[in-house]
Image: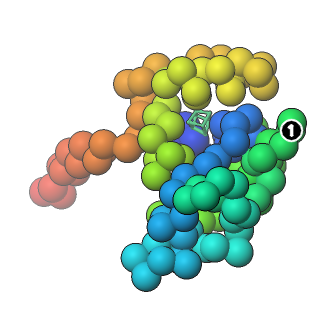
Amino acid sequence: MKNPCLGCGVCCTQYRVSFHWSETTAHPLGTVPVELTAPLRRHEVVMRGTDSASPYCVALAGVPKVDAYCAIHGRHPSCCRAVEVGSDQCVRARRAHGLPDLSPDLDPSPPLAPLPDLPQAA
Ligand code: SF4
Ligand code: SF4
Protein backbone atom coordinates (compact mmCIF):
# COMPACT_ATOMS: atom_id res chain seq x y z
CA MET A 1 0.00 0.00 0.00
CA LYS A 2 1.40 3.41 -0.92
CA ASN A 3 2.23 5.64 2.02
CA PRO A 4 -0.58 8.26 1.89
CA CYS A 5 1.79 10.96 3.17
CA LEU A 6 3.95 10.72 0.06
CA GLY A 7 2.75 13.43 -2.28
CA CYS A 8 0.48 14.95 0.38
CA GLY A 9 2.51 17.03 2.84
CA VAL A 10 -0.27 19.46 3.66
CA CYS A 11 0.18 19.11 7.44
CA CYS A 12 3.65 20.60 6.91
CA THR A 13 1.95 23.76 5.63
CA GLN A 14 -0.60 24.09 8.40
CA TYR A 15 0.95 24.17 11.85
CA ARG A 16 3.80 25.66 13.83
CA VAL A 17 6.33 22.87 14.37
CA SER A 18 8.02 23.51 17.71
CA PHE A 19 10.05 21.14 19.86
CA HIS A 20 12.85 20.94 22.41
CA TRP A 21 16.21 22.19 21.15
CA SER A 22 17.88 18.91 22.15
CA GLU A 23 16.28 17.26 19.10
CA THR A 24 18.51 19.42 16.90
CA THR A 25 22.09 18.77 15.93
CA ALA A 26 23.10 21.42 18.46
CA HIS A 27 22.83 18.48 20.87
CA PRO A 28 25.17 15.50 20.42
CA LEU A 29 22.20 13.13 20.10
CA GLY A 30 19.95 15.44 18.12
CA THR A 31 19.03 14.75 14.49
CA VAL A 32 17.14 17.78 13.16
CA PRO A 33 19.58 20.07 11.30
CA VAL A 34 19.84 23.08 13.61
CA GLU A 35 20.22 25.44 10.65
CA LEU A 36 16.66 24.58 9.64
CA THR A 37 15.34 25.78 12.99
CA ALA A 38 14.93 29.11 14.75
CA PRO A 39 14.78 29.88 18.46
CA LEU A 40 11.28 30.11 19.87
CA ARG A 41 11.20 30.04 23.66
CA ARG A 42 13.85 29.30 26.28
CA HIS A 43 14.27 25.60 25.51
CA GLU A 44 12.21 25.44 22.36
CA VAL A 45 12.96 25.86 18.68
CA VAL A 46 10.70 25.94 15.66
CA MET A 47 11.13 24.61 12.13
CA ARG A 48 11.85 27.62 9.97
CA GLY A 49 8.88 28.70 7.95
CA THR A 50 6.28 27.32 10.32
CA ASP A 51 6.13 30.19 12.81
CA SER A 52 3.99 32.44 10.65
CA ALA A 53 0.38 33.05 9.71
CA SER A 54 0.93 30.88 6.61
CA PRO A 55 3.18 28.08 7.84
CA TYR A 56 5.33 26.26 5.32
CA CYS A 57 8.13 24.11 6.66
CA VAL A 58 11.54 24.79 5.16
CA ALA A 59 12.18 21.03 5.03
CA LEU A 60 9.17 20.29 2.84
CA ALA A 61 10.38 19.33 -0.62
CA GLY A 62 8.31 19.03 -3.75
CA VAL A 63 4.81 20.40 -4.19
CA PRO A 64 2.07 19.74 -1.61
CA LYS A 65 -0.72 17.53 -2.96
CA VAL A 66 1.51 16.56 -5.90
CA ASP A 67 4.89 15.14 -4.98
CA ALA A 68 5.71 16.57 -1.55
CA TYR A 69 7.96 14.80 0.90
CA CYS A 70 9.98 15.61 4.00
CA ALA A 71 13.57 16.28 2.95
CA ILE A 72 14.81 15.31 6.42
CA HIS A 73 12.64 12.24 6.84
CA GLY A 74 14.19 10.02 9.47
CA ARG A 75 15.78 13.06 11.11
CA HIS A 76 12.58 15.07 11.52
CA PRO A 77 11.25 16.17 14.93
CA SER A 78 9.26 13.89 17.18
CA CYS A 79 6.21 16.16 16.92
CA CYS A 80 6.08 15.45 13.16
CA ARG A 81 6.27 11.73 13.73
CA ALA A 82 3.39 12.09 16.19
CA VAL A 83 1.04 13.32 13.45
CA GLU A 84 -0.55 10.11 12.31
CA VAL A 85 -2.59 9.54 9.20
CA GLY A 86 -6.25 10.07 10.08
CA SER A 87 -5.43 11.99 13.28
CA ASP A 88 -7.21 15.25 14.08
CA GLN A 89 -4.23 17.23 12.81
CA CYS A 90 -4.12 15.23 9.61
CA VAL A 91 -7.86 15.56 9.00
CA ARG A 92 -7.92 19.31 9.72
CA ALA A 93 -4.95 19.96 7.45
CA ARG A 94 -6.41 17.89 4.62
CA ARG A 95 -9.83 19.54 4.90
CA ALA A 96 -8.17 22.97 4.79
CA HIS A 97 -6.61 21.90 1.49
CA GLY A 98 -9.78 20.37 0.09
CA LEU A 99 -8.59 16.79 0.50
CA PRO A 100 -10.76 13.92 1.77
CA ASP A 101 -10.33 12.48 5.26
CA LEU A 102 -8.14 9.42 5.58
CA SER A 103 -8.73 6.52 7.90
CA PRO A 104 -6.22 5.86 10.70
CA ASP A 105 -6.13 2.34 9.29
CA LEU A 106 -3.93 3.74 6.53
CA ASP A 107 -1.26 4.85 8.99
CA PRO A 108 2.02 3.60 7.56
CA SER A 109 3.93 4.00 10.80
CA PRO A 110 3.47 0.42 12.03
CA PRO A 111 5.59 -1.95 9.99
CA LEU A 112 3.71 -3.15 6.95
CA ALA A 113 2.88 -6.81 6.88
CA PRO A 114 5.30 -8.77 4.73
CA LEU A 115 4.02 -9.61 1.30
CA PRO A 116 2.99 -13.24 0.88
CA ASP A 117 5.51 -15.41 -0.86
CA LEU A 118 5.02 -15.69 -4.57
CA PRO A 119 4.10 -19.16 -5.76
CA GLN A 120 7.20 -21.10 -6.67
CA ALA A 121 7.68 -21.90 -10.32
CA ALA A 122 7.15 -25.59 -11.01
S1 SF4 B 1 -0.28 12.97 8.06
FE1 SF4 B 1 -2.09 13.38 6.82
S2 SF4 B 1 -1.92 15.53 6.21
FE2 SF4 B 1 0.12 14.86 6.90
S3 SF4 B 1 1.16 14.20 5.03
FE3 SF4 B 1 0.22 12.39 5.93
S4 SF4 B 1 -1.78 12.19 4.91
FE4 SF4 B 1 -1.04 14.30 4.56
S1 SF4 C 1 10.23 18.53 9.36
FE1 SF4 C 1 9.45 17.30 7.67
S2 SF4 C 1 7.62 16.25 8.51
FE2 SF4 C 1 8.12 17.98 9.89
S3 SF4 C 1 6.86 19.69 9.15
FE3 SF4 C 1 8.88 19.84 8.16
S4 SF4 C 1 8.65 18.78 6.19
FE4 SF4 C 1 6.92 18.17 7.52
Q: Front-most of 54 and 96?
A: 54
Model colouring:
rainbow
Q: Front-most of 68 and 15?
A: 15
Q: Position of residue 120 (x, y in %)?
A: 15, 55
Secondary structure of the residue carrying tag 1 is loop
Split into 4 quadrants, where in the image is the N terminus? top left
Q: Position of residue 68 (x, y in %)?
A: 71, 50
Q: Position of residue 86 (x, y in %)?
A: 49, 24
The residue at the point 46 percent across, 52 percent down is 78
Q: Position of residue 63 (x, y in %)?
A: 80, 49
- Is 83 situated left or right of 108 in this image? right
The residue at the point 30 percent across, 42 percent down is 110
Q: Residue furthest right?
A: 53
101 w.r.t. 56: above or below: above
91 w.r.t. 77: above or below: above
Using the rendered view, name the quadrant where residue 109 is placed. Answer: top left
**Label 1 CB, ligand 2: below 8 Å?**
no
56 w.r.t. 74: above or below: above
The residue at the point 38 percent across, 24 percent down is 105
One can see residue 59 in this view:
no
Q: Which residue is mark 1?
A: 54
